[in-house]
Image (cartoon, grey):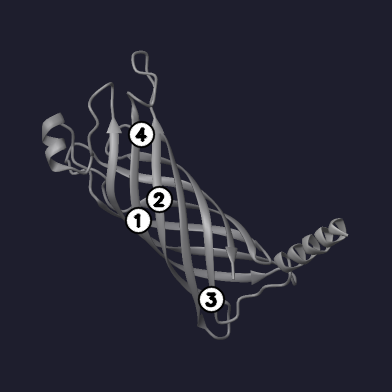
């Protein structure tokens, strides 16, 4: 009897997950995102790659045009950026690691194109305002420091990083009923570090898995 009850419950959950879902006037969604992130060097400065960015977020979409499925989406995003940079002398996270924490406000225009009763395609473009509130960095065996801290910048002789950055972003996603997967690219308008000699900007290729309700 328990076996049959379990099968019935599984079928009900599966059917609700893949039932038809088409946004009408508004929607809410939550998501998990992974970004392959790096600092793009401009004016001859070096590119720095291999950062990993993990984000969780929430968006609220609202239709802005009655005749077409065009939505304005606004939300909040919590991001963790990390990297372990190995070399011949310091090969562990204890000696060479970056940990950066931030909060973003993504704003997007979203266009929804239904493919059939279950599947739809979406394209988005917009901006993301990110505030980095703290970091924990160890480089080449040095003591732990905060790249956003003015005192640490002067003590260790590196360009202080900006806590606020603004970026443009664009991407697409496929929605399967309530579940969606997507990919987008984003790149900062603003410099990451406060220096005339260093002109790096964050760029990222992000992969998203989420649930819309």
* Dots 3, 4 in contact, CB < 8 A: no
Label 3, on which residue? 70
Label 2, on which residue? 79
Q: Residue at x 47, y 64 (%)?
A: 58
Coordinates of residue 154 in the picture (x, y in percent): 11, 35
- Residue 47: which numbered mark, if any? 4
Residue furthest to the top: 88
**Category of crowding for the residue at label 3, using alpha-carbon neighbours closer than 10 angstroms: few (below 14), some (14–19), many (at least 20):** many
Coordinates of residue 52 in the picture (x, y in percent): 44, 39
Q: Nearer the viewer, residue 209 or 2?
A: 2
Residue 55 shows in the view: yes
Query: What secondary structure is marked by label 1?
Result: strand
Spatial CA span between label 3 and label 2: 27 Å
Coordinates of residue 130 in the picture (x, y in percent): 33, 56
- Residue 103: which numbered mark, if any? 1
Q: Residue at x 43, y 52 (%)?
A: 186
Q: Quadrant of residue 106?
A: bottom left
């Amino acid at each position: 009897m328990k076996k049959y009850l379990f099968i019935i419950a599984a079928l009900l959950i599966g059917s609700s997950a893949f039932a038809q879902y088409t946004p009408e006037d508004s929607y809410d969604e939550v998501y998990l995102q992974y970004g392959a992130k790096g600092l793009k060097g401009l004016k001859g400065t070096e590119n720095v790659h291999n950062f990993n960015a993990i984000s969780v977020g929430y968006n609220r979409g609202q239709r802005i045009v009655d005749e077409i499925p065009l939505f304005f989406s606004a939300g909040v995003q919590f991001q963790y950026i990390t990297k372990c940079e190995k070399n011949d002398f310091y090969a562990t996270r204890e000696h060479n690691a970056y940990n950066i924490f931030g909060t973003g406000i993504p704003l997007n225009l979203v266009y929804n194109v239904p493919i059939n009763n279950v599947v739809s395609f979406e394209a988005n473009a917009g901006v993301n305002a990110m505030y980095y509130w703290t970091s924990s960095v160890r480089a080449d065996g040095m003591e732990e420091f905060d790249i956003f801290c003015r005192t640490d910048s002067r003590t260790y002789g590196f360009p202080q990083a900006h806590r606020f950055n603004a970026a443009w972003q664009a991407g697409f996603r496929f929605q399967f009923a309530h579940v969606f997967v997507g990919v987008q690219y984003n790149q900062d308008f603003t410099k990451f570090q406060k220096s005339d000699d260093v002109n790096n900007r964050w760029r990222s290729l992000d992969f998203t898995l989420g649930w819309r309700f």
